[in-house]
Each structure stands twice: as C-alpha cells, then as structure tokens.
Image (cartoon, grey):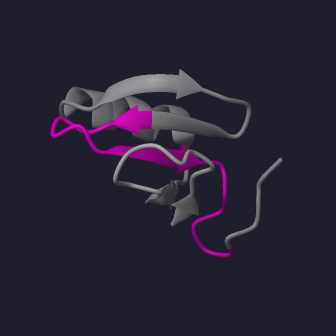
Amino acid sequence: MQRLDSTHGPVRAHPDFAVATRAVETTRQAALGAHVVNVMDRWTVMQAPDGCVYCLTDHDPSTGRVRR
C-alpha cells in the first residue's frame, strides 16, 4: 500500500503493484477497462473502471527492489 499525502477524501492510500514489464501491463490493464492517469519515471498511475486508483511500478515482483 502506498500512503498518500493528500488529506482530502476518504482514501489515504492505494495499492502499488510490482510488475514484470510496466508498459506491457499498462496496455493489458487498459484493454480490461482501466485508464492511465499519469506516467512517471518509475510508476504508472491507473484508475480502475470502478474509480479506484492504483499504481503499476518498476519494482521487481520477486525482490521488491526498484529496477533501474
């Protein structure tokens, strides 16, 4: 879970998912109905069809370490 700095709204955190290949996973999730909110250097902010926000990250799914 990623804690958010925002003090507004009922949710103060959202899930971050470490994925093998962020670009591939972003395309796959968009095909399933999610929307790309923002693309950053090491993560992509997505919004699920139900409105929930989450991130796809460049962290290695096996180790949790950031891939560079």
User: As drawn, which residue projects farthest toward the bottom?
Assistant: 63
Q: Position of residue 10 (x, y in %)?
A: 34, 53
Specify whether residue 60 is painted magenta.
Answer: yes
**Residue drawn at 54 percent across, 40 percent down:** 22
Q: Quadrant of residue 18?
A: bottom right
Q: Position of residue 1 (x, y in %)?
A: 51, 66
Q: Position of residue 46 (x, y in %)?
A: 40, 35
| Magenta stretch, overall SS | loop
**Residue drawn at 26 percent across, 32 percent down:** 34
Q: Nearer the viewer, residue 9 or 60?
A: 9
Asked if residue 41 lies left or right of residue 9, the reply is right
**Residue drawn at 68 percent across, 75 percent down:** 63
**Residue drawn at 44 percent across, 24 percent down:** 37
Specify whether residue 68 is painted magenta.
Answer: no
Asked if residue 57 lies left or right of residue 49, the reply is right
Q: Nearer the viewer, residue 45 or 4?
A: 4
| Region rendered in magenta | 46-63
- Whether 5 is drawn above or below 64: the answer is above
